[in-house]
Image: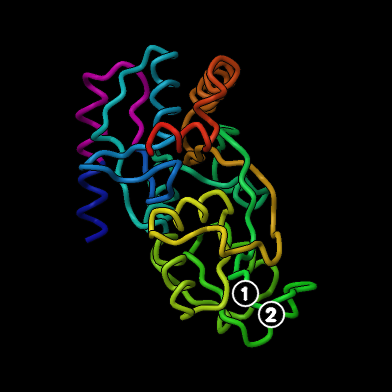
Amino acid sequence: MMLKFAFYLLIVMLTHSAVAKGPSLVWFTEDYPPFNYHVNGQVEGIAIEALKLIYLDLGWDFDDNNVMLLPWPRAYQMTLSNHNACIFSMTYTEERAKLFQFIGPTMDNHIAIIGHKETSYHLANLKSIGDLKIGVVKNDIGHQLLRQSGIDKESLVFLASGFELVQMLKLKRIDLIAYGDVIARYQFKRAGINPKHYRIVMPLRSSYLGFACNKAIDKKIINKMNDALKVIRSRRPEIFDPEHFYSQTE
């Protein structure tokens, strides 16, 4: 199955490289609103809007067919194994910078352990988790931070998406989730759950979101995209503001 998928990617890249103006890149993403998510067969959100503006500023052709929405674990591995692949939106860490080339920041991201306001959980540190079960998405930044901190796998419950995380938290199938605060709040709203009923139990890391590309991609391409993103952020800062995005979609 993976060989067939890789072959398909190769055909896509070869086909578009013959006609497209600009680099032949394949973009992987996940359901991670409000930055990237699926609507009527298209990927929408803050990140995809920023990516299209980068291409526009650089005079490159953008093809929506080169953007593929997959579960995060698969998108992560496909980006690592394909030389012309990039992934978004990814939280920057020094560990990830050893594996990917980053284009960013697009905006800040605060990763935290989140729980219901009515619970009495007070974590002095990660060692005090005890028997609590924490929901994570595999290879998401929340999962990676907990793994780096030495949290036992037995304490983790792996789910497919942030949407499933908030649903399972509401149903009390898990005690906590490790996820980006802004994304969690959006997922709560999306699931019809009042985000005011939930709180940050413990902050994990503050960083930024961006685009991450395979190390084999020409550094000149990465530099051009970073320069274009800086110009766009200074020219149109409102599109990187989740509150502005919410007002446009409500």
Q: Is residue 184 above or below residue 38?
A: below
Specify the quadrant that holds the C terminus: top left
Picture residue at 56% right of the left edge, 80% below the top: 133
Q: Which label lies toward us, 1 or 2?
A: 1
Tell which circle, 1 or 2, labels the residue nearer the N-terminal end: 1
Please, what is the three-letter code of the amino acid marked with disc 2? Ile
Q: Which residues are magenta?
A: 10-26
Q: Is residue 184 left or right of residue 43?
A: right
Q: Nearer the viewer, residue 178 or 18?
A: 178
Q: Which residue is mark 1?
A: 118
Q: Position of residue 82 (x, y in %)?
A: 38, 45
Q: Nearer the viewer, residue 233 or 5?
A: 233
Picture residue at 22% right of the left edge, 36% below the top: 12
Q: Which residue is mark 2?
A: 129
Q: Say which element carries label 1.
A: loop
Q: Say which element carries label 2.
A: helix
Question: Is 53 one of the magenta-colored residues?
Answer: no
Q: Is residue 125 above or below residue 46?
A: below
Please, what is the three-letter code of the amino acid marked with disc 1? Glu
Q: Position of residue 55 (x, y in %)?
A: 40, 20
Picture residue at 61% right of the left edge, 83% below the top: 132
